[in-house]
């Protein structure tokens, strides 16, 4: 899963209250103010214990920009008021006009956090903690300063902390351009925080005080680490079980790259009521850093969590660029393909079971076909709910890519091209077109006819029949219609190599 689709329907909203807090100057020594263009913005954000009101103070290096504007226009509804340097009210109809704010000046604004979080699919409350996308409360400078990262500090009640995916030191976090474009997960309040290593080393407990918010994102180690923000609520697996689950999912995904795709990650674990599956929902966000939110059913046992596909699926998203909406079938397909492949490689299921799961997914995807093209289906899936076709037809595409990459004279694999594409997309953290990703893969592995394959699939209205490809791979159907291995097939060795991982 990729965007916050189901959250609003699943989550209880529990908390009420009101408080008035105060933010102090966020910055250390002030930079020079002589530049003509607007300088970097420095935010200081305070919340009340009830997490119902957020007060932000924003100071600028040099000239103030023309205005502060919400990252998503819908968020303008949550602004209560805005003040200039002398405490004067600022015009704030849809944007906060900063005309007349002098160089080096600071402004303040107040957000109705309760209203912003209530009923929003981008926020949830669990006892004394609030998980909320910054797009609901962070207002960005307009125009944005060029190449100047912003900073943010949090001033919180004494037993509260913050967890974000933003890099930071000593309580000050850095906001790059993507933090003002894409959603980021921010957890504020009272919750448990753990640090685990995403490499093969031992994991360690967080030993810092909850009142020191800098603890949430200060890392000195170059190895991959995840902050686990675990919200209140019962999970049968317990804290150690949850840590083991995340560590094992991360290790499985590291098999594609040789290491985990990102060096720092926030994982927000939200226990919810009981359910039939161990994990109810997963969501990856990339604004200013990588975060994954996982909604966990309270009756989930450790082994069930470890065997579940959701965390692996979300982590695989971090190995490829964020694709534009009409191409989401490619990124969802790659993540869904690997959720089965990586569980086989990690011995969490047999290779035959993985092939059967892929086959069942294709069948489910075919059943919900609506006669629209895959591109249209992907663009509108949040409205139409045709997720299964988008995800599983994309998965078939990922299998086709992998087979083509492995069967050319200069043999490669989907693992290899994803791994080698990493540098390109990490240096260009923007939303990509699907064709850009495929041409990058071909630059790495040589021409494979991906553009034609892409056009065929994107414009196709019917789910492709997987059986011809299955037969080449030595996957034939028994009397019950279930896949079985045929080791005499032309590409049986490719079938086995897919589920065996990097050699
Ligand atoms: Zn996904």
Image (cartoon, rainbow, N blue to C red):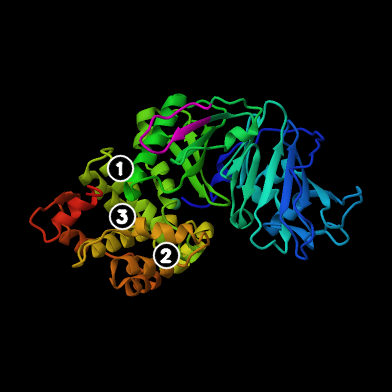
Give the mark nearest the N terminus, 3 or 1.
1
Disc 1 designates what residue? 343
Secondary structure at badge 1 equals helix
* Left or right position of 187 against 29: left
Query: Mark 3 or mark 1: which is in front?
Result: 3
Callout 1: 10 Å neighbours few (<14), some, many (20+)?
A: many
Rendered view: 238 above or below 180: above
**Quarter of the image holding residue 276?**
top left
- Image coordinates for residue 162, horizontal then vertical, percent: 63, 36
What's the distance in space between the residues labelled 2 and 1, CA to CA?
31 Å
249 to the left or right of 266: left
Picture disc at residue 167: none
Residue 410 coordinates in the image, percent (x, y): 21, 66
Q: Which mark is residue 415?
A: 3
User: From which residue to which does the magenta span run?
Assistant: 194-206
Using the image, determine if residue 290 lies above or below residue 218. Answer: below
Specify whether 111 is left or right of 198.
Answer: right
Query: Mark number for residue 370?
Result: 2
């Amino acid at each position: 899963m990729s965007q916050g689709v189901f959250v609003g329907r699943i989550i209880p909203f529990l908390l009420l209250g009101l408080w008035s807090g105060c933010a102090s100057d966020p910055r250390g020594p002030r930079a020079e103010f002589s530049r003509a263009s607007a300088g970097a913005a420095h935010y200081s954000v305070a919340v009340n214990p009830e997490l119902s009101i957020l007060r932000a103070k924003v100071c600028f290096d040099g000239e103030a920009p023309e205005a502060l504007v919400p990252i998503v226009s819908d968020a303008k509804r949550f602004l209560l008021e805005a003040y200039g340097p002398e405490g004067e009210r600022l015009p704030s109809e849809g944007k906060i006009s900063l005309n007349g704010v002098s160089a080096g000046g600071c402004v303040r604004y107040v957000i109705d956090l309760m209203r912003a979080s209530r009923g929003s699919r981008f926020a949830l409350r669990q006892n004394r903690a609030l998980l909320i996308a910054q797009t609901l409360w962070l207002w960005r400078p307009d125009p944005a300063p060029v190449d100047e990262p912003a900073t943010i500090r949090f001033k919180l009640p004494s037993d509260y902390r913050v967890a974000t995916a933003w890099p930071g030191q000593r309580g000050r976090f850095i906001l790059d351009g993507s933090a003002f474009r894409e959603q980021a997960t921010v957890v504020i309040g009272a919750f448990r925080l753990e640090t685990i290593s995403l490499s093969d080393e031992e994991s360690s407990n967080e030993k810092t005080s909850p009142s020191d918010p800098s603890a949430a994102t200060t890392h000195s180690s170059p190895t991959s680490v995840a902050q686990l923000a675990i919200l209140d609520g019962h999970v049968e697996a317990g804290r150690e079980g949850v840590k083991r689950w995340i560590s094992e999912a991360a290790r499985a995904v590291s098999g594609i790259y040789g290491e985990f795709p990102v060096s720092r990650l926030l994982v927000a674990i939200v226990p919810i009521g009981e359910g039939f599956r161990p994990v109810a929902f997963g969501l990856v966000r990339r604004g200013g850093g990588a975060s994954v939110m996982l909604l966990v059913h309270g009756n989930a046992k450790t082994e069930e969590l470890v065997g579940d596909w959701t965390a692996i699926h979300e982590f695989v998203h971090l190995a490829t660029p964020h694709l534009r909406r009409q191409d989401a079938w490619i990124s969802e397909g790659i993540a869904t393909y690997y959720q089965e492949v990586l569980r086989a490689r990690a011995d969490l299921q047999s290779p035959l079971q993985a092939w059967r799961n892929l086959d069942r997914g294709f069948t489910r995807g075919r059943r919900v076909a609506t006669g629209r093209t895959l591109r249209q289906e992907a663009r509108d899936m949040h409205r139409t709910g045709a997720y299964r076709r988008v995800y599983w037809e994309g998965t078939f595409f990922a299998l086709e890519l992998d087979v083509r990459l492995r069967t050319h004279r200069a043999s490669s694999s989907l693992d290899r091209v994803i791994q080698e594409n990493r540098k390109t997309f990490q240096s260009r953290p923007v939303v990509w077109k699907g064709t850009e990703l495929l041409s990058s893969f071909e630059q790495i592995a040589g021409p494979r006819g991906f553009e034609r394959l892409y056009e065929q699939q994107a414009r196709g209205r019917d789910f492709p029949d997987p059986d011809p490809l299955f037969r080449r791979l030595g996957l034939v159907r028994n009397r019950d219609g279930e896949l079985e291995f045929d080791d005499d097939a032309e590409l049986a060795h490719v079938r086995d190599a897919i589920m065996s991982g990097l050699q």
